[in-house]
Image: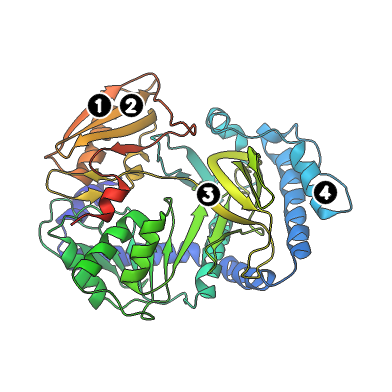
Amino acid sequence: MSWAQERLYPALPVAGQNLACTLAGFARSRRRFTPHFHRTLRAWEASVRGPEEALLHLQRTRLDALVRRARAEVPFHRGLPPASEARDDRRAIQETLSAIPPLEKSTYREHVRELIARDIPRSRLIRGKTSGTTGTALPLWFTRRTLAEEFACFWRQRRGAGVGLRDPNLTFNGQLVVPFGERLPPFWRRNHWGRQTLFSLYHMTPENLPHYARAVQAAPATFVQGYPSSIHLVARALLESGLALPPGRLRGVFTSSESLLAFQRDTIERAFGAPVFDRYGVSEFCVSMTECRERRLHTDMEFCIVEVEVEEETEAWERGPLLVTGLATEATPFLRYRVGDVGTRSKVPCPCGRPGQVFLEVDGRLEDYVVTPDGRWVGRLDHVFKEQGDVAEAQVLQETPAALRVRVVRRPGYDEASERGLLKEFRMRLGDEIRIDLDYVETIPREPNGKLRAVKSAVGRPRAAGAHR
């Protein structure tokens, strides 16, 4: 976090913070909506209506090019076998991928510098980090072309629901747009360039949520986007305040970054009067699935290839861990990356008529809320760990609203400054009233499905949030 974000922004009046959000929105827009984005969006809006054979041919063409570049320009991949020369595209893709060993996250971390393509000038590389949902934020390098193609995936989904690029929207994600100590509304800020109302996720107390509901009612918007856990809390407030939006006022609610639960979808759709469209993606830009009106997730086949390591199977579906290959990952090619999630792939075509691979569900990020002493319900704490490179893994445990216990697996470079930085990130989002104890451990136990739960709370479970007043 920069000095301007940490010190200057909180000191600005609301009008100044709105201006800062607008300037940041302008800069993001310039990075994202490039000529390549518009060309890609037009092409992929056409390809989604074509036959599956055309999608497979495009996948095969992009995979072959990715493998050639990886062999020539990426030190880690110099030993890869060449792509298959089979005439059939489906068979060629299978043969090419089967010759490549899966890429584990631990391997990526250990060899990250060797995975950067040498033919891309440093001036074109953008530095980033993964979301850090388990306290393990990985360093990333990508390009504007990669970013533009991922944006083409979800803007194709949005345009299919009748949403335009310049439509006004309500956003619920993890940005610190409202200083934590703010006690009075507005608990939202405006990005006028993006026609965006940015709602804080860190002020959602029972007393404040009616203000959110009234702001949603008053703000001009065509769609809503953000984390389902936070949108769900506002949906409850809309229903309880008698302020549910009339059906048809919004074109859609677009959720991502967390597992969307069935009761959350039902509440959100009733409160906002619009269908929910979910999306599955990761910070590594190597997979994208977008939901259709039949509530099924379609692999964006122009952007990625998804394999399932089958562990369960019926005549209708197959289920297992996902291996993903990012066809747009030109800076750091992700080939057969074990992303850590489990998917259920349908064996029958989707009733919506869209061709290609379709999933019934992806078991990804299911987290509890953290509840603060003053009644705030905070979901999605991954932003705490994004800058904590000395933390190998972490897990937040909560038994009462008064305190948290954070299990931390340290890396060799972890020191007192690392501890201060970690606590500061928590305090910026949860305040000073809650007690935070750091528990340094060698390992963190996994759930029966093998996953690490980032937040385990006895007081902030999602189903309890459904009954939150």
Q: Disc 2 marks which amino acid?
A: Val
Please report whichever mark, 4 or 1, sits nearer to the chain's N-terminal start: 4
Circle 1 or circle 3, nearest the eye = 3
Mark 3 falls on what kind of element? strand
Find the distance from the CA under tag 2 to the CA under tag 3: 27 Å
Percent position (x, y) of residue 21? 29, 63
Furthest residue toward front: 315
Mark 1 falls on what kind of element? strand
Q: Is residue 439 visible?
A: yes
Find the distance from the CA under tag 4 to the CA under tag 1: 51 Å
Percent position (x, y) of residue 366? 40, 45
Q: Nearer the viewer, residue 302 or 448?
A: 448
Provide the residue designation for mark 1.
438
Provide the residue designation for mark 2.
408
Provide the residue designation for mark 3.
362
Q: Nearer the viewer, residue 461 or 393?
A: 461
Percent position (x, y) of residue 313? 66, 43
Label 1: how many residues lie within 10 Å, few (<14), some (14-19) or many (20+)?
some
Quadrant for residue 309, please give it.
top right
| Callouts 2 and 4 close, C-beta under 8 Å | no
Q: Disc 4 marks which amino acid?
A: Arg
Q: Disc 1 marks which amino acid?
A: Leu
Q: Disc 3 marks which amino acid?
A: Val
Find the distance from the CA under tag 1 to the CA under tag 2: 7 Å
Q: Is residue 273 left or right of residue 121?
A: left
- Which of the image's four quarters has the C terminus? bottom left
Mark 4 falls on what kind of element? helix
Q: Is residue 176 visible?
A: no
